[in-house]
Image: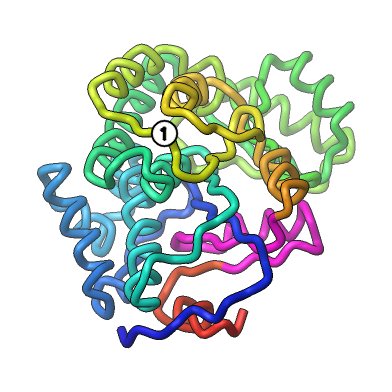
Amino acid sequence: MEAVKDTPGVANRAYVFPGQGSQRVGMGWELYTTSRAAKDVFQEADESLGFPLSRIIFEGPGNQLQDTINSQPGIMTVSMACWKAWEEFLGAAPPQPTSVAGHSLGEYTALVVAGVLGFGDSVRLARERGRLMRQAAAARPGGMAAIIGLDDFALEHICAETGVEVANINSDDQVVISGDKLALARAMDLAHLRGARKTVPLPVSGAFHSSFMGQAQQGLAEAIAKLDFQDPKVPIIANSTGTPLTTAAQVKEELVQGLCQCVQWKNSVQYMVRSGVSQFVEFGPTRVLTTLIKQIDRDAQAVTLCDPASIQKMAEGAV
């Protein structure tokens, strides 16, 4: 890629990073073949993990990539490749953001960008998180479902009646619930009866961001304790509270507690907007967070850097 200067903008930027559900076989291939910096990220991931993760990302099979132990480091690697390709294209470090945030797993990419961990440590930690979550899901099976277009009062009552838990508050219109399969099925039926526009079972292997993941917390805490965390160079907006993390100790607690807590994405975006952010830049294989951000705040500018064309457009100040 030929380096160009980033056109100075007036927007206060936040950088955001997606989580599970964004994965697809072949993601990141165009960056791998056009950007030396992106290729280095894939190679570092393979070396750090001790196996060719990049082969699973580029070639599949799909069921291997969908496995949370691979999808978590896989999505993180592609997001980091997007970041590094943009940095390479600019020919300098990207402009300093007001804050960074990641949706669930995306927090692990945010750690790297905020200077808390190096990429090698963070991608290994993401894979260990996936292993522990898979183990917890096997011990206590469950699933997740998106509920679209249902008011908060009705959802609260459905959770009380069925025992499902709110796992993600993604926007005013979209909430994700977690629980055992029978409870989820009943909750989706009740949601339809009480006015939900749509319910969608999610293709995940467990009841993530709920009490079902409690078994994974101790193992993740032990893995975190072995690593050298630095204080963030820019605030990381926490999934669990929608408020800034500014110390290494706060980050560690967020990662462990976040396994069982709801992802407050709507609150996170609203906090960043109130703090002066007017432009969100998503780094990852899809536009999932960009879409949610525009649903949360129609006045916010949100763009996705996912391939060479989008990176060039952004770097030249066309967005």
* Quadrant of the snapshot with the C terminus: bottom right
Q: State left or right for residue 117 relative to residue 13.
A: left
Residue at left 63%, top 74%?
9
When asked about the image quadrant of residue 270, the answer is top right
For label 1, the crowd category at 10 Å Cα-Cα, with few meaning under 14, some 14 to 19 and many 20 or more, is some
Q: Does the magenta-highlighted stretch encompass residue 286?
A: yes
Of 41 and 147, which appears nearest the observer?
41
Residue at left 33%, top 23%?
132
Residue at left 44%, top 82%?
5
Q: State left or right for residue 263 relative to residue 89.
A: right
Q: Position of residue 52 (x, y in %)?
A: 14, 52
Circle 1 is placed at which residue position? 231
Q: Which residues are drawn in magenta?
A: 277-303
* Quadrant of the snapshot with the N terminus: bottom left
Q: Position of residue 109 (x, y in %)?
A: 40, 47
Is residue 315 visible to us here?
Answer: yes
In the image, what residue type sits under mark 1?
Asp
Of 287 and 230, which appears nearest the observer?
230
When asked about the image quadrant of residue 61, the answer is bottom left
The colour scheme of the drawn protein is rainbow
